[in-house]
Image (tube, rainbow, N blue to C red):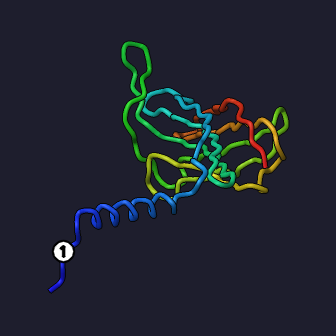
Amino acid sequence: MQSRPTTRRRIARTTLGAAAIFALQPATPASAEVRETKGNVYVDTPYCTEGKAHLEREEYGQQLRVREARTDNVSGTDVFGSNFCLGAISRPAGFIRASGLLARGSDWCVADAPKYSTSTTDSVIRGVGFHGNDLPCGDGNYRYTSLSEVLNGQWNGGHLTTGSLYMWK
C-alpha cells in the first residue's frame, strides 16, 4: 500500500514547481516606448478617413522595433454645418491605402511602399518590424510619418507624424 504524501512533501513539490517556472523566465524584464498619433485626416460626407502613425521600441533581450501606418475608412455626416466621422464603412479592394516615411533627425531614411486593401474592407495596416542591426539609419532620434488615403472619386486623406523616439543598434 502506498503512503499518502505528507503536507510538507506537497508544499515542497509545489514550491519547487513554482520556482522552476520562475527560473525559466528571462532575467530581463520587457519594456517598451511608443510614439503614436491618430486622428481624422479627411472629413466630409459621406466618407471620412482616419489615420494612425505608430513607432515603437521594445526591449526584451534584444531590440525589436516596429513602425506602422494605418488607414480606416469611416462614414462621415453633416450635422448642422459640421462634419462628424462615425462608424466603419467597407470599400472595394484597392480603395484604401497606407504608407509611411521613416526619418532620423531631419533625414528621410526609408519610404514604405503603399499597401492597398486586397478585399472589401474598412481598413489597411502597413506595418514593418525590424530588429537589432536592421536599424536603417544608425543610432538616433526617429519619427514616422504615415499617409492614409481612401479612394472616393479621388484619393482623400492626409499624413500624421509621431513624436521623436531614440533608437540604437
Query: Helix or strand or loop: what does disc 1 sit on?
Result: loop
The quarter in which the N terminus is drawn is bottom left
Residue 98's quadrant in the figure?
top right
Image x and y of residue 77, in percent: 39, 26
Toward the viewer: 144 or 130? Answer: 130
Q: Is residue 142 left or right of residue 26?
A: right
Residue lying furthest bottom? 1
- Percent x, y for residue 94? 55, 53
- Left/right of residue 123 with respect to residue 28 in the rendered view: left
Residue furthest out toward the left? 1
Q: In front: 4, or 91?
A: 4
Image coordinates for residue 71, horizontal then vertical, percent: 54, 42
Q: Residue shown at 39%/64% (left/top)?
A: 17
Q: Residues within 10 Å of mark 1 (few under 14, many from 20)?
A: few
Name the residue at 45% across, 48% down.
91
Give the residue number, with chain letter if any, for mark 1.
Answer: 4
Please tell me whether residue 100 is drawn above or below residue 85 in the rendered image: below
Q: Which quadrant holds residue 47?
A: top left
Q: Residue furthest top?
A: 80
Q: Nearer the viewer, residue 35 or 149?
A: 35
What's the residue at 48%, 27% (across, down)? Answer: 44
Give the x, y percent position of residue 43: 50, 27
Residue type at tag 1: Arg
Residue appearing at x 78%, y 45% in the figure: 168
Vertically, is 151 above or below 39?
below
In this rendering, would 27 be left or right of 133?
A: left
